[in-house]
Image: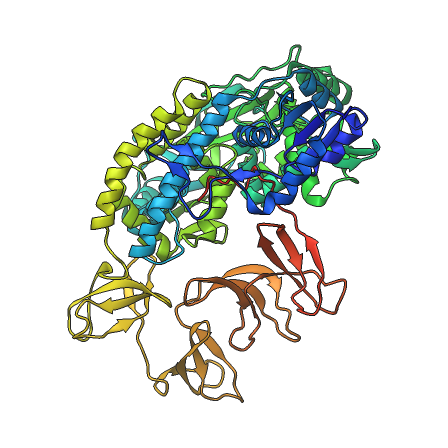
Amino acid sequence: MAKPLIIVESPTKIKTLTKYIGKDYNVAASAGHIRDLPIKTLGINIEDNFKAEYVNITNKAKVIANLKKIAKGADEVYLAPDPDREGEAIAFHIMDILKKKGRVFHRVLIHELTKKGITDALETELIPDTDKYDAQQARRKLDRLVGYQISPLLWTKVQRGLSAGRVQSVTVKIICDREREIRKFEPEEYWTITADLLAKDPPPFNAALVKINDKKTKITNEAQAMGVLADIEAADFVVEQIKKKTIKKNPQPPFITSKLQQDAINRLRFSAKKTMVVAQQLYEGVEIDTGGPEGLITYMRTDSIRIAPEAAQEALEYIVNEHGKAYALDQPRIFKNKNKVQDAHEAIRPTSVFNTPKKLASFLSEDQLKLYDLIWKRFVASQMTQAQIDQKSIMIKATENYTFSVSGSTVRFPGFMDLYATEEKTTDNDIQTLPVVEEGDVLETKKIIPAQHFTKPPPRFSEASLVKELEKNGIGRPSTYASILSVIRDKGYVDLEKRYFIPSELGFIVNDLLVESFPTLLDISFTAQMENNLDDVESGRLNEVELLTQFYHGFKKTLDDAAENMVSVKGVGVATGIACPLCQKDVNIKIGRNGHFLACTGYPDCSFTSNYLRDEKGNISIVEKFEDNTPVKDCPKCKEPMIQKEGRFGLFLACTGYPECKHTESVGQENSDTDTGVSCFEPGCEGTIVEKKSKRGKIFFGCSKYPDCSFASWDKPVNKKCPDCDSVFLVEKENKREGKFLKCPNKECKYKEKAIQETSADQDPSVD
């Protein structure tokens, strides 16, 4: 009689499971989704209650054949894909493929890959969750209905190859809206005044002017600042009031997915995608000295801050042993979820608090250790006592009209902050140490400093702040944030420059067209409500077909209107408000084979076209054209004339003193390339490899010294030597069959190795 079969989602889990239960069960993996909607057709019968046409994924034929082979003879199959909606869909599709008379299927939810976690899961047999599957199907169908019907519209109106995902489009809109806020922002002048003061005893300190005539300070120009300075220049600075209080600071709850991504981005400089890749490795199991792989954290896709009581008790035991009773709570601290969340999961925590970062340091990679340390400390701190901080504020009068203030704090008892002792010291540099003073003391004035400032525009979104914005607005769910951020970059709608998102020209064009034609679909509150509706489907409060029917009724009407009325960038183009320098008619933005350009609306009578630039306010200017022999400027190196040329990758200026002088400059592209930080591989070249866009908008990688250096590659170079030949670098490639892998660029060399990649839970098929 064949052993019962356990089917997990990721192949890397097999070894961990086999270590604990290999004698009693066979274990296999689906390697993510095995069925999906067809690629070339919509795959949804709208007339038949939105029935889906699922097909086997082409490159999963061998996986499916292997599952059938291993399952042969097994009367019991335990479906153990990840414990989320995507995992539930995978479980249903496996069950559909392996169904057989007399065969029994059990759903098991493994929240941590430890002996206890696996044993508990197998002892808690469940039936596959139809409501959760319906919720995943509803999301999949919604995204397919939007993506497969709006995208062809963009191909007709803008350019082929574009896509318009339901959630990704709203994310691009958020970034575009912020950029427009920045561009229209007008800075306002304001002044601050601080005084360097000295009491009877050191240390010296500085205080800021906070009130004038008992009203909040508002100094808007230099004349006002100089007037204040004249009033207080000879004044006595007298201590008017001293306020003391002790505040209690609580630790934060353990991580949920979004907070982990934000902290990893800010503290570790990880991307959201990298954070989830490394977290997946820690969850699935790492080889440590226990004789095999062991899962080190609980499941990393969660929006719940709940923790198991036994895990909290274990943390208290550790805290007492390592820090002392004063740092441990009498009872575990319970965190309650405030918002509606999928509470089946715990928060992200270590599977054993006794697996300290120090203990595991020799078994983890540098990235794994950094992320594990972040997760471990956050969890342990959540069960430690409050920190007690003494705060002192000193109010100082300079004449009756002007009030200065200074605050300082000292830690009376560190509590949970003791765990972060070395880190806290690096963040408290701005806190002043205050001298002992009493009310009525006259302070010595060392210097009074006026300073001019200007208000700043709202900041662009970093990966961390964008995840926070999506979370705040209820857009997406924990498992989707990383894929959303990846997709909008891969599609060319936004660029990540110096760690901040900036909309591309294409992003602005597509966003504006979609907002004009699909205002409801791109409304933030509508998208958030749709996420709530999907949650209601999962909980059984809303029927999947009812949700899809309500959505599609309005969407179809809007889609038909857009097909007829959406502006064609290929045809009419996007208005700019600029007059043609030849005929004075309007010049519009159009998109052709070589990308965006300006074209006169008077065509064919006027054939004016030009490249263009945008300034920091978003204003468009025409890039002046020059004949090949028309000097543009003098060469900064040899003073010979420079002329404009066009190469494979766009316009550039070249010195006419060539070949004696090889100086070149790009035209209007100073900030367009993203530096990868990898040095150029050409011998003697001092350039770096940068991510560029071809004239057709396709991403490639070239040397920053182009055209002096002609190194270019369509694949991303990786600073790693090929072990089989003399190539000094490998390139990163990806296909559906193998996922991401590194390959030698030498065609005669067949070397290939697997690259770190995300499992199928991050490769969300709902992004069409």
Left or right: where 328 falls relative to 407: right
Residue nearest the observer in this picture, 194 or 689: 689
Q: Residue at x 65, y 66 (%)?
A: 745
Color scheme of the displayed model: rainbow
Query: Where does the image place residue 618, in percent across and percent down from the top left?
Result: 30, 57
Residue 199: tell me if it is visible. no
Q: Residue at x 50, y 42 (%)?
A: 483
Q: Which residue is drawn at 32% across and 48% down?
A: 511
Q: Quadrant of the C terminus?
A: top left
Q: In which quarter of the image is the N terminus?
A: top right
Relative to 472, residue 739 above or below: below
Residue 140: tell me if it is visible. yes
Q: How many marks?
A: 0
Left or right: where 259 falls relative to 548: right
Left or right: where 579 falls relative to 641: left
Relative to 232, residue 579 above or below: below
Relative to 212, residue 249 above or below: above
Q: Which residue is drawn at 49% across and 24% down?
A: 132
Q: Which quadrant of the figure has residue 231?
A: top left
Query: Where does the image place residue 576, in percent across and percent down from the top left?
Result: 23, 60
Left or right: where 617 falls relative to 199: left
Residue nearest the observer in this picture, 596 or 751: 751
Query: Where does the image place residue 154, in percent across and percent down from the top left?
Result: 33, 52
